[in-house]
Amino acid sequence: MTLGDLILKLLFIVQTGIGVLGNTFLLLTYASISCTGQALRPTHLILTNLAVANFLVLLFKGIPQMTLIWGVTHTLGKTGCKLVYYIHRMARGLSLCTTCHLSSFQAMTISPGTGGWMKLKERALKNNGFSCSLCWVSNLLINISVPVHIEALQHIHNSTGTRNYGLCSSKTPGTSSAVKYTTLMTFPDIVFMGLMAGASVYMVLLLLRHHRRVRHIHTLSNSHRFSPEAKATQTILLLASTFIFFYFVDSILTIYSTVYFKSPLWLQHTTTLLTSCYPTLSPLILMIRDPRVPSFCF
């Protein structure tokens, strides 16, 4: 075992452990707040959805990959491979959809309360639960074709028609099928990424305008400081930018491994490590930026 292999193994353990504990902590915190009858903010439902999605990503991608890098292979049968890859893809899409929903919801929340914006705010608040449910249903349906090409590793012989993922394998589809499959899987991601980027740019412009207004106020009070809505917006912008960064890096590595059919094993491990970065970092960002989370538990 080289030093690089040992570092990579330890990174997987630390990353998965922190991510699972952080998302579990958030879920228990929001559940406890709900049980005690305290008022929940509208974004709490979205953040709970996000914590569940991130937990599933770590559970069905991070943990299997961690067992692989520690030398435990042939642990998943045909059904296990199909289930693990389906839930991982669904949870990854759910995390993207929920983060997009969170950014769009916050953009409407801090928008000027005049004209059509007020009606849009009321409609977004009223349909908040429906939007979260729609993210679940859409990703469950979009990724229903994922298990079709996944097979157990021991059932696939080494050939140019199969791709080895370490624990599982998949049959290489034809050119036309690959184009259709890629289009089906990437189109929702492109739409959600576009909406998230647009909402983020809009929130940045609103924050800049707010900053220009308050920086000329020189009083002894705290009126020049950012409001709670502005702080929440900064937190959501940090979440969105973190997701976009790791998504694009992961996409570049995935495209590279797809073009070069036999990608090295270290590249597969690095891609998985980057895929799990956002589910690991997002609960830490929320706990650091939101004082209500730790203060409630203590």
Image (spheres, rainbow, N blue to C red):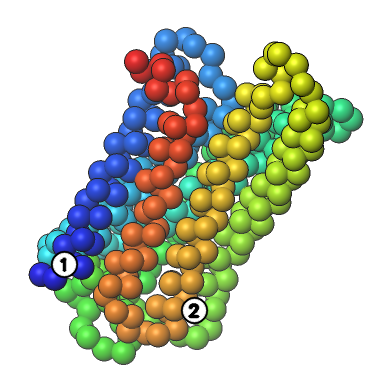
**74, above or below 115, in the image:** below
In the image, 76: left or right of 96?
A: left
Residue 238 tag number: none
Q: Quadrant of the N terminus?
A: bottom left
| Residue closer to the observer: 19 or 205 | 205
Q: Can you give x and y, in whole percent of width and height, for residue 116 in the image?
A: 86, 33
The disc at residue 3 is 1
Furthest residue toward bottom: 160
Q: In the picture provided, is 75 more to the left or to the right than 16?
A: left
Mark 1 crowd level (few <14, some 14–19, many ≥20, 10 Å Cα): few
- The answer to which quarter of the image holds residue 64 is bottom left
Tag 2, which secondary structure?
helix
Q: Residue drawn 71% across and 41% down?
A: 203
Can residue 274 be spotted in the picture? yes
Residue at the limit of the structure toward the left, as seen here: 1
- Mark-to-mark CA distance, 1 and 2: 38 Å
In the rendered image, residue 186, in percent from the top left (x then y), is placed at: 55, 66
**Residue 236: horizontal and vertical position, in percent?**
58, 39
Q: What residue is rendered at 33% in x and 66% in y?
A: 270
Q: What residue type is labelled 1?
A: Leu
- Mark on residue 178? 2
**Looking at the rendering, in which quadrant would you find the C terminus?**
top left
- The disc labelled 2 sits on which kind of residue? Ala
Q: Looking at the rendering, which quadrant does residue 238 occupy?
A: top right
Vertical placement of residue 66 versus 203, above or below: below
Q: Is residue 216 left or right of residue 31?
A: right
The image quarter in which residue 61 lies: bottom left
Q: In this view, does 27 lie to the left or right of 3?
A: right
Where is residue 136? Give x, y as percent.
50, 44
